[in-house]
Image: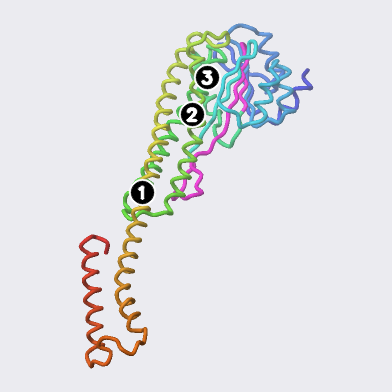
Amino acid sequence: GTGAAAPASDAVVDCAVYRDGVRRPGPQDPAAAIGQARRRGGRGTFVWIGLFEPSEAELAGVAEQFGLHPLAVEDAVHAHQRPKLERYDETLFMVLKTVRYVSHGELTSTSEVVETGEIMVFVGSDFVITVRHGAHGGLGALRRSLEENPRQLAKGPSAVLHAIADQVVDHYLDVAADVRDDIDEIESAVFADTRGDASQVGRIYQLKREVLELKRAVTPLDRPLQQLSETSIGVVHPEIRSYFRDVADHLTRVADQVGGYDALIDSILQANLAQVQATQNEDMRKITAWAAIIAVPTMVCGVYGMNFEHMPELRWRFGYPLVLAVIATASWLIHRGFRRNGWL
């Protein structure tokens, strides 16, 4: 009854009855709105209710009024769902991941690049209910834009579902373009430093994690959009199916971009690791070369430090300078050899 729907008032962002694509003046209470819509009847009359992060109790009242399936209601209350499309009798339930690019001065190993949220949509013959989770992805501007296009809105609740899917996928394209700038920046930083910087690895891994988060939002949406564009579904207006094909094409494009980003980041990471390894090898060669040079005076001094009574040139006046000259000459010759071989 109406009492069951009352708790939803705190979560309701907007609630309106539409007839032939035009918003009708009426109550903001979902129960009263659906009652008004069903009294007037007609194919072009439906209710659009927008909810923001409703609790289980708040959504239960709306679910009772509209006959929503308990499993779908449970998914709508608890976020962190994969993008999907499910059919419950005459009702469609769709989950979409929203994304937002998080601006940052400089990419670090802890920078958040992509922030995700969710929009769950219930679509019936005379209602559409949107449940939004996350601080971004608001639908107020989208609702106003649709209200300015009564011809499209007159096609019913599926027109709202298409508009939401179209907006979400357009945001994917925008975020993908911004992420590309981050990839270009880190690619330039990696290849500008020919000696290799091990500290870049943390930044690259963080960017890869954020790209994977974007990928998890984009990739699973392909199947639901294919179903909406190819399958005849009662609550989806026949003309809207062609619009879903256009959205699916855009999604395929952004999915290809994100897949390319993932592969490119792997290449950048491998290049950085190769640079670091080459630098370490070069350092080890230098250390080895100097160790070989130092071994010559160490050996000679070690021999003459054994204090035997009968040793060559032990009492000769020029013995000490001669030994120093031999050490210097041998060290110079070894150093010259290493320089020629590129070790020093």
For residue 234, which quarter of the picture? top right
**Numbered disc total:** 3
Disc 2 crowd rating (10 Å Cα; few below 14, some 14-19, many 20+) is many
Position of 201 with respect to 7 (left or right) is left
Question: Please, what is the three-letter code of the amino acid marked with disc 2?
Answer: Val
Q: Is residue 87 above or below residue 307?
A: above
The nearer-to-camera label among 1 and 2 is 1
**Disc 3 designates what residue?**
224
Position of 124 with respect to 152 (left or right) is right
Determine the residue positioned at 48% across, 14% down: 229
- Label 3 secondary element: helix
Quadrant in the picture for the N terminus:
top right
- Label 1 secondary element: helix
Is residue 202 in the magenta section? no
Question: Please, what is the three-letter code of the amino acid marked with disc 3?
Answer: Pro
Q: CA distance from mark 1 to mark 2?
A: 31 Å
Q: Earlier in the sequence, mark 1 or mark 2?
A: 2
Q: Position of residue 258 (x, y in %)?
A: 42, 32
Position of 251 with respect to 98 (left or right) is left
Q: Is residue 160 above or below residue 54?
A: above
Quadrant in the picture for the C terminus:
bottom left
Label ID, residue 22: none
**Disc 2 designates what residue?**
218
**Disc 1 designates what residue?**
274
Q: Nearer the viewer, residue 279 or 133?
A: 279
Q: Earlier in the sequence, mark 3 or mark 2?
A: 2
